[in-house]
Image (cartoon, rainbow, N blue to C red):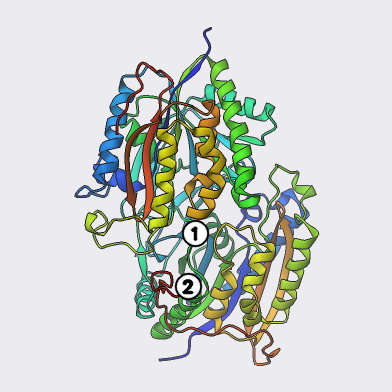
Amino acid sequence: MEEADILFGIYCPPHPQPLLSPEASEGYAKLRQAYDTCRERIENSDADLIIVYSTTWPSIIGHQIQAHPEPEWVHVDDDFHYLGSMPYKFRMDVDFAECLRDSAKERGLHSRTIAYEGFPIDTGSVVALKLLNPDNRIPACIVSSNMYANRAETIVLGKSIRDALSKQGKKAIAVVVSSLSNRMFTEHINPTEDRIHSPKDDEWNRKILEFFADGRLEDLSQLSREIHGQIRVQKVVAYKPAWWMAATMGQHNNYHGEVLAYEALHGSGGAVVTLTPSSGSFGDKEFDEDDVEYYHGDRDVLDKGML
Amino acid sequence: MPKGEIVLGCLAPHPPHVVYAENPDQNEPVSEGGWETLRWGYNRLARKLKTIDYDALVIFTPHWQTYIGTHFLGLPEFKSKSVDPVFPNIFRYNYDIKVDVELSEIMREKASEHGIITKMMRNQDFRVDYGTITSCHMLNPDWDKPIVTISSNRNAHYYSAEVMNEQAAALGRACAEAIEESGKKVVLISSHSLSHRHFVTESPLPEDMSREHIYNHSQYVWDMKLVDLMREGKMRELIDILPEFTEQTIAETEAGGLTWMMSAMGFPQYSAEIYGYQSVIGTGNLVAAWDPNAVTREIVL
């Protein structure tokens, strides 16, 4: 089996402003410009596939994989409905989705494909695919983020994606849709006055962006729990995007990182970043958690009297 | 104009499984049944509702999650298909919903006067959440009354369960004032489970009841504690311990629905009508009602 081929990775925010109201503030326009740069790079690549992991698609029954060949709907965001509707029609790589489902199962994950007319594709995935791949030139695959999943499950999901890419010999672009700090203002604001919610959030975001710029993706993965505690509103059990991105892209620090934009999105930290595999390494700095190859499920430590 | 009033408050959980099990024409998947204890309780409460004179259903839903204030449906009709993002295999429901926009606007206005950040939702493409649809379908399968849906502002995420309790109680007081001013007779619906830990796998046949049970005993004990307080008419005490219950059982009360409804009803000191309790994919679900009318109030279970 060939080594998985990830051409490059993109980290981008889920909020709809760069799609629906880029003119509303200088910051939103810069984010939109960064998306456009990524779009051009995708167009100039010879990628076979775009794989999207969106933090705004939560699942409960394992991980779900979009497998409708042409999902089509008009999406409206729960909070930002007044910015307008988001009609979409995407092209999915059904063969890859099915291969990924099987690969995930082989590594002990519960996973399933979903292919239903009218399935609500989430805001983050819609924004990313409409901006990064507007003409559906390249087929996509969207995977959910299980709300109960923690590190092991998320790492193994990333490895399953590598397995599926290797089996099919496909070249892919990995897209993570997530904020950095995710605390928004709880009142309506003038977009021109948008800023990061707090200096603490801003400092942490900039530290994370330093890591990205240095190509230290695996180090960020190792720091996920700390990031979750420091700047993430506790909606889910963990900050998983760096785990997924690192596992999908090979678990190392050998990348050329570029921060194309960093701006506030209603107080949250919105960054568009690219990571391209390179030969030089920054070195491994923060490795203190074990790797995991297979997901063994809940270990039921309470039931076994281990505590 | 006579003053409006709340004629009933309903705790109406929204696992889509119960609609799936009922096999209504609107839902595409077909089942062999399941979750009868919950559904039969719902059916009985729906029959009671048929005997009550009311103008609108007002529902507070955890599945329209907003972080920037509390939002209200603000258009007269929504017609579309709702596909559950978590359980699309069992819930693909074609809905045609009428909204009492006048009541919705009065509620938003009152909430705003109480210092709550608010927004009317006026995008016609907006998809009504499956929590609203499931609870309303089970309580009024004829859909012959207009509804008002109120989003759940996620104070528990941004601050704490205690802050959620305070804000939801303030919203409840505002909505009660709005109902009184409207002159309408209103049924309130708090749409959520109690304990809310799910199994992360699903049996091949979702309605296989041999596989259904509460996630763990701790969740069950907490759920029963709340049921006891409801039976005893101690709703103030229940709301006071809600932050701890919510944290211990990752309960769906985190959205604020129960606090909102109890606050709007003045924290009833009479017994709740208990219609049924059952687990759905591990979560604890209770159908209950609070009838302010002592003449029609029943001991159901």
Among the two numbered marks 2 and 1 on one chain, the one whose residue lies closer to the N terminus: 1
Residue appearing at x 63%, y 57% in the figure: A233
Q: Which residue is mark 1?
A: A57
Q: Nearer the viewer, mark 2 or mark 1?
A: 2
Residue B208 in view (yes/no):
no
- Residue B103: % across, % down: 53, 23
Q: Amino acid at mark 2?
A: Leu
Q: Amino acid at mark 1?
A: Trp
For residue A203, what is the image quadrant? Answer: bottom right
Q: Is residue B262 above or below residue B224?
A: above
Q: Is residue A277 above or below residue B155?
A: below
- Secondary structure, mark 2, is loop
Q: Which residue is mark 2?
A: A307
- Residue A66: % across, % down: 41, 63
- Residue B257: % across, % down: 51, 38
Q: Is residue A109 above or below residue A218?
A: above
- Residue A306: % across, % down: 44, 75
The quadrant of the picture occupied by the C terminus of chain B is top left
Q: CA distance from mark 2 to mark 1?
A: 34 Å
Residue appearing at x 51%, y 85% in the figure: A5
For residue B282, what is the image quadrant? Answer: bottom left
User: In front here: A206 or A166?
Assistant: A206
Chain letter behind tag 2: A
